[in-house]
Amino acid sequence: MQTEFSHLNLQDSVTSAVKDAGYTDPTLVQINAIPKILEGFDLLGIAQTGTGKTASYLLPLISKLSTKRSRALMPRALILCPTRELALQISKAFKLYGKNTKLTDLTIIGGTSYKDQERAIAKSPDVIIATPGRLLDHCSKGKLLLSQTKSLIIDEGDRMLDMGFIPDIKQILNLLPSSRQIGLFSATMPTELEVIARQILINPFKIEITPQGSTSQEIEQKIHIIEQVSKKDLFIKKSEHLLLTIRGDSKLKNSIIFCNRKKDVENLAKFLSSRGLENACLHGNLTQILRNTVLDDFSTGKTKHLIASDVASRGLDIPEVSHVFNFDVPINLEDYVHRIGRTGRAGKRGNAITICFDREKPIIEKIENLINKKLDKQYFYQKNQLADKVTFGNSTSHSGTENVEKSEGKLKPMSEKPWVQMNNHIPDFLLKPTTYSKN
Ligand code: AMP
């Protein structure tokens, strides 16, 4: 028998909000997590974004909180997540699912005013959704007390680990009452996180929705191996290959293009704009307001191509991305799974193309080991005929292919910015034949 939301013991106010959101049936992670959280179990949820994991903890949380007094003096639940964008997204979902209740939430993230946040804390929100650093700032100033916060959700645990947030989380745990319920969600379960999970969760109920390091069957994954060039031309070679691929793909509706470094995000954006491909950048150096605008424009289709650092690789719920490009092979192998997970969501077909050079093949092999799948490799040696030479500042570079020439009419000289000289370096240690642990 198909499980329905009405079978999950949620409050009517919550099930009706879910219905209004257009959800007909609960997802697998929701079927498994909701009853356990309602029963008060600690929970370890291994689930990627796109599985419905946010609702799997928000729905029971809202349901539980709404049955008790609606305004406590201190927050009753805390949701910790690694990035500002994810916090804002969770807050949006909270408002959607909690719209029939009187519950209030507050997002505490960096990049926004302390004073405004302090004023909002003083209004005693029921739920706080926060990134760890800023939350601790308020706690250490005595502006926020967590001694009544009996529910804690840690979202994107693996990302928290990567971003060095674990000491902050441990500090926050010390501020919570000893009798508390914790839900830890993570797309992958590295050993270090497993150790922490053992320390902080008591008798947890474990849900694993996707096998570790798995990638959606809905994503067609390709590796484009392009001809090795001199160090100073690596960036331009990859940029031109990317442009050609984008222009030549009739199925492409929109894309997220991931670079390893913020600098390259900017440089690639400039390159693509100079070739007539409108795009926007997303990386950690942008102000929060700008990051939000960029994400909104991409989500609404105003911007077709988003060039991003790994700030966009996890957790963000951006609907309908037809293509993900890895302009750089990710340095952290698990980021491959997160990056390509931005496409092929909610049962839709997606495409993921990773551009690399021959010398990076050992890293591709490690990715294949991680996802337990051989990837389709296409070679682009000598395939693209080199056309005119264009001068960039004081360096000279080949300007691309016949196709680029035809589609663009003429090639424009580039800006004087020295971006063409910025090459992507894969650290040598990643090229050594080390064994990658799947844990
Ligand atoms: P998440 O994994 O939490 O990032 O959720 C991914 C997307 O699935 C979000 O856009 C949710 O609105 C949507 N979603 C969550 N639960 C359901 C459901 N039961 N039915 C349909 N869509 C859902």
Image (tube, grey):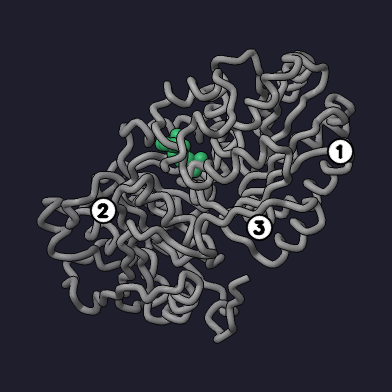
Sequence-wise, the earlier of marks 2 and 3 is: 3
Q: Nearer the viewer, residue 287 or 78?
A: 78
Q: Which mark is in front, 2 or 3?
A: 3
Residue that appears at 24% across and 54% down: 246
Mark 1: amino acid: Ser
**Residue 317 seen in the current view:** no
Q: Residue furthest front?
A: 1
Q: CA distance from mark 2 to mark 1?
A: 65 Å
Q: Which residue is mark 2?
A: 413
Q: Nearer the viewer, residue 330 or 27?
A: 27
Residue that appears at 85% across and 45% down: 171
- The image shows residue 49 at horizontal and vertical percentages of 50, 47
| Above or below 138: residue 235 | below
Mark 2: amino acid: Pro
Q: Which mark is in front, 1 or 3?
A: 1
Q: Which residue is mark 3?
A: 162
Q: CA distance from mark 1 to mark 3?
A: 28 Å
Q: Secondary structure at mark 2?
A: loop
Mark 3: amino acid: Asp
Sequence-wise, the earlier of marks 2 and 1 is: 1
Q: Which residue is mark 1?
A: 179
Q: Which quarter of the rendered picture does the N terminus lie within?
A: top left
Q: Residue furthest bottom?
A: 433
